[in-house]
Image: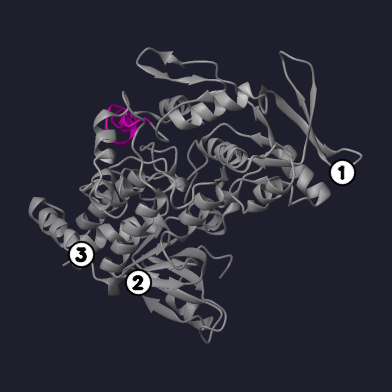
Amino acid sequence: MLHSSVWADGLVEAAGIPLYDMLLVSVGGGIGSFTLLDVLRIRGVATADMRVLSTSDSPWQTWEYLTRVSQLPAHERIRSDSGARPDNIWGFPSYALQEAWQERSMEPLLQVLTEPVAADFYSPPAALVMRGVQREAERIGYWEMLAKGQVRMVRKRLGGGYFTVLTPPAGSGPTKRVALRSRYVHLAVGYPGLKFLDDLQEFRQRRGERHRVVNAYEPHEHVYDQLRKRPGVVVVRGAGIVASRVLQRLMDDRERYGLQTTIVHLFRTYVTGSHGPHAFMRRKGGDGWAYQAFTMPKSAFGGQLKAQFRKATPERRARLAALVAGTTTPKLARWQEQLGRARRGSWYHPAHAEVERIDLTPDGRLVTYTRSASAAPMQYVSDFIIDCTGLEADMPEHRVLADLLQHGGARPNRAGRLQVGQSFEVLGAENGDGRLYASGAATAGNHFLAVDSFLGMQTAALDIADDLARRGFCKGLGPLRSVSQWVRWAANRRPA
């Protein structure tokens, strides 16, 4: 079976694998799976017809973990627009309106009305997002559709549709694996794992070091705890939103507890000012940072850039993505004030340099060897290194995606992700009347730019649902149904 790309029903039954029939299966169990199930429930699909396969207990579990360890705890504000609500496809009321109502304060509304001229862009607290997703998950019966376990593979079924092989939690059933037979499969598997720079990865493997050289997306609270106990030097690498959050945490702790922490910040690319190809496509920058309020320009979610990307050739898409989807962070007033104080106090040291290698000093501290085109080679001795360069998204690193490339007919696009059509169907993976869809990070580089965002996953869910409606799986979402379902959402009543 492992070497066969198409399975017959009898082959699965002969292997002693229990078979369960379902119309649609979603693999992942994160925000991507949640948004599709939410849209389909709003369009009239029953919970009995769908299953979400996941190792997570809730759709926000992985997102909450990643935001927390990357220094965005529940009370902090995330990098998302007021109307980007994964729990509300209509975007009304917005997060700003909801927060204003709950806090009995006009401040969120005034911020939205004056952004970005007189105020920073509004963004919601992480806790507000999680509470909304939990409410909507309960409303649509998410846990009635959840099947816990590890998905091993998705294989085509002889005659159409797919088999999805799941390993349930140990002791939860009589067999080690089960198979779900469905006409439709949806993949929203997120990122395969952490991404380390080559020199950091080499050092960690060579020295077995996991305590002092850490990735910002793995638990590293011990770094801040140690710095509270004694003075230390931290090397921070990266120039995106996570790097800015880590820096803010280090600076907050220094100011709050009167610490003597010294920060060395290494930039691979150092931005000195506004940059871009022409006056109508420029991004603010300075002091090493490229500034952008959200992960993408707003027009990528529903404006001119979205239209350009949809119509563009693969070559032009690659060029556009390189221009607008680089490493950026919001330019927030409070954080800028902190950086200014840190520079004046000479305890924050930014540097533009390439790292050659990491090693240990004779007394066991970390030393970072760098080179630069405009300066002499440098050595930075530190107690900790925090890598803020991001998450790994290469498909061969993910078991299900790698198997899909080998046996499922899927093929990579120019960005190395799944090639999908206009309805986010995975091209090459069609099987009779069955379709395999994907959303999230695994679909970057196709016709829609902002796939790895709340609005991006909602856009994918709506496009997938439209395609499923054409195939008779769910109802359309015309004006009357949309209004009636919004009323049910506002009253917290189950979809009908």
Badge 3 or badge 1: first in the primary sequence: 1
C-alpha distance separating marks 3 and 2: 19 Å
Residue 492 - label: 3
Instruction: Estimate how packed mark 3 is, as few (under 14), some (14 to 19) or many (20 or more) residues with alpha carbons within 10 Å.
Output: some
Tag 1 residue: 364
The rendered magenta stretch, by its main secondary structure, is classed as helix
Q: In this rendering, would 191 be left or right of 459?
A: right
CA gap, disc 3 to disc 1? Answer: 58 Å
Residue lying at 43% horizontally and 55% vertically, measured from the top left = 188
| Coordinates of residue 19 in the picture (x, y in percent) | 43, 79
The quarter in which the N terminus is drawn is bottom right
Q: Amino acid at mark 1?
A: Gly
Q: Quadrant of the C terminus?
A: bottom left
Label of residue 356 in the image:
none
**Residue 329 in sight:** no
Q: Which residue is mark 2?
A: 145
Residue positioned most to the bottom:
174
Is residue 485 at all visible to an observer of this figure? yes
Residue 308 drawn in magenta: yes
Report helix, strand or loop for mark 2.
helix
Question: Where in the figure is residue 88, as x and y percent of width and height?
Answer: 25, 53
Mark 2 is surrounded, within 10 Å at the Cα level, by few (under 14), some (14 to 19) or many (20 or more) other residues, namely some
Residue type at tag 2 = Met
Q: Quick one: 309 or 484, which is closer to the camera?
A: 484
Horizontal side, residue 361 vs residue 133: left or right: right
Work out how far the residue at label 2 is from the one at label 1, CA to CA, in angstroms.
52 Å
Q: What segment is highlighted magenta in the picture?
A: 297-311
Q: Nearer the viewer, residue 427 or 28?
A: 28
SS type, badge 3: loop
Observer-side mark, 2 or 1, equals 1
